[in-house]
Amino acid sequence: MTTPHDSAPAPDYLERLARFVGSTPVEDIPEAVLARTRDILLDTFPVIANGMRTPELMALSDSLMTSGSPGPCWVIGRGRTTNRIDAAMLNGIAGAWHDFDEGNTLANGHPGIQVLPAALAIGQARQHSGRDVLATIALAYEAVCRIGMATRVKLIVNPHGTFGVVGSALASARLLGFPVDRMRQLASLAASSCMATNRHTMIDGATVRNWYAGHSGFMGQMAVRLAQSGFTGPSDGVNTTFSLVLGDGFSGDVAVDRLGERWLLLEGYLKLYPTARYAHSCIDAWFDARARSPRPIDPKDISRIDIRAYRLAAFLAKQHPTDWFGTRFSLPFAVATLAIGGRRGLEAFGNEAVADPRIRSLCSRIHVREDDAYTALYPGQQRVTLDVHLTDGTCITGECHITSGEPSRPHATTDLERKFIDLAEPVWGAADSARIRDALLDIERCRDVSQLVDFNP
């Protein structure tokens, strides 16, 4: 007969999450999950490269590569390499720069750019296979997603640099051979190293917000170094940080519900516009209104546009962003730049578009407010209603219930291929872009990701 003292306690939620990332064999990950992870990597790669070509990232990467230690890890878009910590940090910042990276509504953020840069950099530094790196990204993504889903995030908090620090630490630990039985403590330590982020950086067009994603890749690896050096974390840093500091509640049971059975990675989205996810709901409502109109809508004939949206979308109500970065977080600008037309992709949300008097004029006539009923439906629905009032008294209404790109409303493959080409070819040219695309699509066959392509992209 056994007593309670004779049996080991059941693993808590954090132990289960940590062991899930640390010890799940590649063979136990469904092929559909690995395929989706590959799609995320393919989508993210040229997004990082374009961010890396901006003046700020050029200056920062030059500074780090001049003063830091060398290494074999790609600084994507620069054609150069550096050590794994700096590479992960730079690629994370660059990947968030244009707000064109993938995300997950359930996770309240962007799990991919939090874990992918560290996994790729360590994979290259330690010469891991493509399949190992892909599996690590998938498992760590799941941990980030589940912590995000289990948290009632404070509205002011920007999700970059928060849940991702834990996922990046666990991804790093798996690829660095950190003991699995110490990964729970590592996760607690990493959760105690998150950033105090805020959404006002978005509204104010402050690009320090993009550093938050780089912090995940940097701090995740640093957390492993701290743990290896004997540093310790609190008994449950995840619960403390996300229930009291960055959130107003956290449920460990939610974090591990159907862990390994329901893969939240399969429920994420990819973007066709370089804006905050919530703006995409409004963009869809605009295109719905345009499709319902009996004739083309001439912007000069619009007297006013009224937008009703769920809280996170309604937060982006600023009418006149002052620069390209602010356009990512303005519903009025997103509608106005697409209504005026003539530009697409990054150009539609660039400084020339900000200065366009036609866009500025239309922005002044677009008004946003929160609809409490729509907020109550979120995240199951991402509802937005857009009323276009014309000067002749006509009102055309467009709606979005499920944002395009969500699993139940996926983008067309041709649209995603066009996004890759539009972003990749200006950086690498047509031939090298095609080589990179083929290599990423075939990454599971690669024995050493430092040799994924035979040039530094």
Image (cartoon, rainbow, N blue to C red):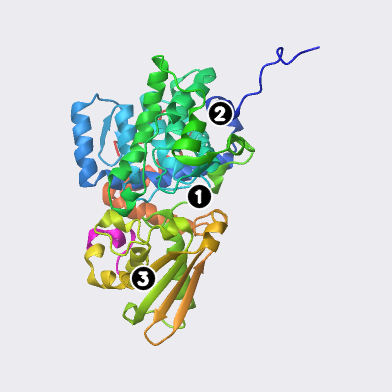
Q: The magenta stretch spans which residues? A: 342-352
- Relative to 358, is 206 above or below? above
Element under label 2? helix
Most extreme residue toward the right is: 1
Q: CA distance from mark 1 to mark 3?
A: 26 Å
The structure residue drawn at horizontal position 24% and vertical position 42%, both measured from the top left corner, is 57
Which quadrant of the view contains residue 257? top right
Q: Main secondary structure of the magenta part?
A: helix
Judged left or right of residue 157, residue 381 is right
Residue bearing the label numbered 2: 14
Q: Nearer the viewer, residue 241 or 117?
A: 241
The structure residue drawn at horizontal position 49% and vertical position 34%, both measured from the top left corner, is 140
Residue bearing the label numbered 3: 366
Residue bearing the label numbered 1: 105
**Quadrant including the C terminus:** top left
Q: Residues within 10 Å of mark 2 (few under 14, many from 20)?
A: many
Q: Of label 1 and label 2, which has the lower sequence position?
A: 2
